[in-house]
Image (cartoon, rainbow, N blue to C red):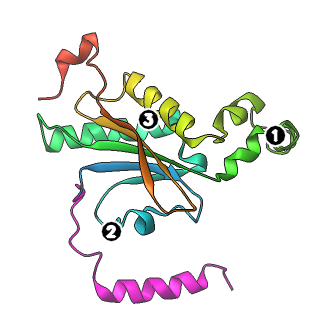
């Protein structure tokens, strides 16, 4: 029997409610969340995000990787085609206290993981979230500096405290500056 079976049973209950029917592709809330895959860090719980509210990317540490930037660029382009001239949405990058990626700061752990998986040790070290306020600032800067992120999107940074349950704003929403080639924006 699959370990997913208890969750599949929950799915049958969910499907019977019809809550999934008729949801629009554009979210109800003008936000795009990037946060950690840690099971203690579920935006449905700590932000009250409901089905259809917002796109959510969850990865180790909630880090802004090239793949995350590419996904934001895709959703930004899609939103621009559906709502020309927008402001589009705010990307909220949310890191948290007590993140498991902190193990990546330990050279022995990192070296063993790299040897076991073939992942690059320097890249692993860069993913560690020790001080979530520092890493969220760095990730917000990375998004704001990316030429792939349209200037109609704002980016903010936050820390979720596992002990208090509170989310603190670390960086207020800011938008990327238009690049020299931005005059060709989708019409």
Task: Please report the residue visible at 45 percent of the width from the left and 58 percent of the height from the top.
Answer: 166
11 within the magenta span = yes
- Give the mark nearest the N terminus, 3 or 2: 2
Tag 3–tag 2 contact (CB < 8 Å):
no
Question: 103 or 168, which lies in front?
Answer: 168
Task: Please report the residue visible at 12 percent of the width from the left and 37 percent of the height from the top.
Answer: 84
- Give the mark nearest the N terminus, 2 or 1: 2
Give how far apart the Cα atoms at labels 3 and 1 are.
27 Å
Q: Residue furthest top?
A: 180
Q: Quadrant of the N terminus?
A: bottom right
Please state if 2 lies on the left or on the right of 32 as rendered.
right
The region drawn magenta spans: 1-28
The relative height of residue 111 versus residue 186 in the rendered view (above or below) is below
Residue 129, x across and y down, in percent: 63, 42
Mark number displayed over residue 69: 3
Q: Residue furthest front?
A: 164
Residue 184, x across and y down, in percent: 18, 18
Mark 2 residue crowding within 10 angstroms, few (<14) / some (14–19) / many (20+): few
Figure quadrant of residue 176: top left
Question: 90 or 6, which lies in front?
Answer: 90
Task: Please report the residue visible at 85 percent of the width from the left and 45 percent of the height from the top.
Answer: 116
Circle 1 residue: 106
């Amino acid at each position: 029997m699959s370990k997913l079976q208890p969750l599949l049973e929950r799915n049958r209950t969910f499907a019977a409610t019809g809550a999934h029917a008729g949801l629009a592709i554009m979210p109800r809330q003008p936000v795009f969340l990037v946060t950690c895959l840690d099971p203690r860090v579920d935006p449905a719980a700590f932000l009250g995000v409901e089905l259809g509210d917002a796109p959510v990317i969850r990865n180790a540490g909630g880090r802004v990787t090239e793949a995350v930037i590419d996904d934001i660029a895709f959703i930004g382009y899609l939103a621009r085609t559906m709502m020309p001239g927008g402001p589009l949405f705010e990307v909220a990058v949310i890191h948290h206290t007590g993140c498991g990626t902190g193990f990546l700061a330990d050279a022995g752990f990192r070296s063993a993981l790299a040897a076991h998986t073939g992942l690059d040790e320097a890249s692993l070290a860069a993913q560690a979230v020790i001080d979530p306020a520092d890493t969220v600032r760095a990730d917000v800067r990375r998004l704001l500096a990316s030429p792939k992120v349209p200037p109609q999107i704002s980016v903010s940074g936050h820390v979720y405290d596992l002990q208090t349950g509170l989310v603190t704003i670390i960086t207020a929403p800011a938008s990327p500056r238009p690049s020299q080639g931005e005059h060709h924006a989708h019409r």
